Structures are given as C-alpha cells and as structure tokens.
Image (cartoon, helix red, strand yellow):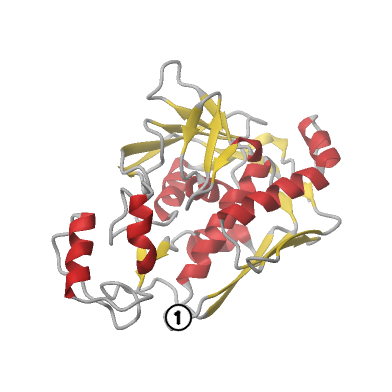
Amino acid sequence: MQRKQRTIQNSKSCNGIGLHTGVESTVTFHPAPENYGIRFIRSDIKNSPEIKADIDHVVDISRGTTIEENDVRIHTVEHALAAVTGLRIDNILIELNSKEPPVMDGSARDFVNALLDGGPIFQTQQRKVLEIDRAVNYTDYYRDIDIHVIPSDRFRVTFMVEYPLPALGTQYEAIYNMEEDFAVEVAPARTFCFLSEVEMLREQGLIKGGALDNALVIVDKEIDKNEIEHLRHLFGIEETIINGVNGILNGKVLRFKNEPVRHKTLDLIGDLALLGFPIKGHVTAARAGHASNVEFVKKLKKEYSEELDVLRNGKIDE
C-alpha cells in the first residue's frame, strides 16, 4: 500500500534552554513542501542559513548528535528528529533562534505535542521509503555494541541495554507499530546520565542546561552530604537533593519501568532520520549510543547507495 508524504498545517513552537549549551532557545516547526525532507534553519544568524538533516553533516557525538553545514552548527538534534520521524512526517522546516533545541523535560513529548497541534496532513506525492531487502550489520567488538537491520513489513525497532546497577539492570524495548506507539510509548522517555559522569560532563562544557527537572540522574556511587552540597552548587539547585531509594537522584518517579532503554530507542530513531529517508525494516540494537548509531547509519547509506540515489531521483517506493 502506498502512503502519501506528510507535513503539518500550521507552525508550532516550543521554548526552553539547551541541554548542553544552556542557551535560551525557541524551536518552531513549519510546514514544508513535498520532497523537501527535514531541514533546520538558524534564524539567529544573518541570512538564516539552512542545515539539512543528513548523516554527512554530523560533526560531533558528545552526549548528543551535532550537525554542521557551511560552518553553521546545531547541537543535540536527535529529539526533534525523533519526534518528526516517529510521527511519520516527511517534510518539515525546523527553525531555531539559537544553536540547540530546548531540552524541555528531557524527552520528545513536547515536540510531539507541538507537531500534533500543528495538524499533520497528507500531501499529494507518494512517500519515498528505503525498503530493506538485505541485512546490514554493525558491530563494535571492543564496546560490545551491535546494531542490525533486517527486512520487515514496516519500520520496527528493538533495543536492549545492560547496566550493572539495580536501578537499571538489563532492559528491553520493542516498538512494532511506530505510528501507533511512538507518541505514547517512546516520546515521553527522558534523557538520563550517571551521577559519576555529572562533574566530568560539566568540565567538558556539556550539560550546562542540565537540571533535575529535565534529566534522570542514576546514582551509581556512594554520595555523602559534602557531595550533595557540591551538586547543589554545581547546578545552582536550591531545593534539597536526596539519594532516592529507587536509585534515581531525588527519587524521581520513572514514567516507565524501562524508561532508560525507551530513551535510547528515542535517540536511535532520531539518529536514523539522518539517513534522509524513512526505512521499512526492523532495526535491532544492543548497548548502542550516538556514536554507534551514526556509524551504523553511515554504513547503511553506503550499503544502499544505489537505492538511495534512485529515491533522490524521484522513484516512489511502495
């Protein structure tokens, strides 16, 4: 069955601060014409340059995916891309008035709600989809990471993570009907990090906009009163910080029992959007992150280069 391309009827915005840059930011999703694809625009820069969402534009994967075109960068694009892809929207212009989309609550839920409020609509031309007819495998033996894609009747994702912590352990998530499940089962999952990483990430110039209301902090080491005070100073937190009995700093309640692996699934969906076309295939991932996601998409692009060229030149997939 052929599907028409989709965009949105009306522009919609979200406001907040960037997770890693800490910069005030507004992201606005605009309708776009057929065959436009997914593009970003920096309205804070002279002449408002556009940056195409493309795997060849990835320049950094430090705790997020950063793209750059003609010396113009956008940081942490994966949540916005996941929201667009998860809702099966093909053509969209994503306007930013700074260099990073707002983190919101650490998930893609607000972006999904904005896009739904914008009114997804079908367009005239048929959707162009890369149909997987042979497997592509990516393995990082040193880090014990695997990502594979095999033929399927639709876009599906299965993800597994393993952590030697009671709060996480081994987690598994399977999304078999993206169109029906993404907004409810994947988009609300929030980003997370480990307490042992927090200070290092700040020293690296990252998570400047990180706070306990936009990220889950997994307690993976013993903490005392002195460290708690240090954390309050580091993040400018006024309220009390506690070591939650559930292994999450401040005892924050999870939205899902396996929320961390669902967020990993969210990130993977966003990174897959950088291929430039949606895929019809089953992607399975184990212990993957942004670096491996990007390498997998690069390999997928190389293995299917002829098919992607045909799609770019106008062929319509079923």
Residue positioned 59% across, 44% down in the render: 89
Taking the view exactly as shown, the residue that stands out farthest to the top is: 47
Vertical position of residue 65 compared to residue 135: above or below: above
What is the count of numbered marks?
A: 1
Q: Position of residue 157 (x, y in %)?
A: 65, 63
Query: How far across and how far down the image is residue 201, in percent?
Result: 38, 55
Which image quadrant for residue 58?
top right
Name the residue: 45% across, 63% down.
189
Question: x%, y% of residue 41?
Answer: 48, 28
The x and y percentages for residue 104 are: 35, 51
Residue 148, compared with residue 52, is above or below; it is below
Q: In front: 291, or 135?
A: 291
Examine the rendering and report whether any part of residue 2 can be seen: no
271 sits left or right of 217 in the view: right
> Quadrant of the rendered structure where residue 281 is?
bottom right
Tell me the element at label 1: loop
Is 167 displayed left or right of 59 in the figure?
left
Q: Which residue, given by chain and number where applicable, does mark 1 sit on? A: 165
Residue 95 appears in the rendering: yes
Q: Residues within 10 Å of mark 1 (few under 14, many from 20)?
A: few
Disc 1 residue type (three-letter): Leu
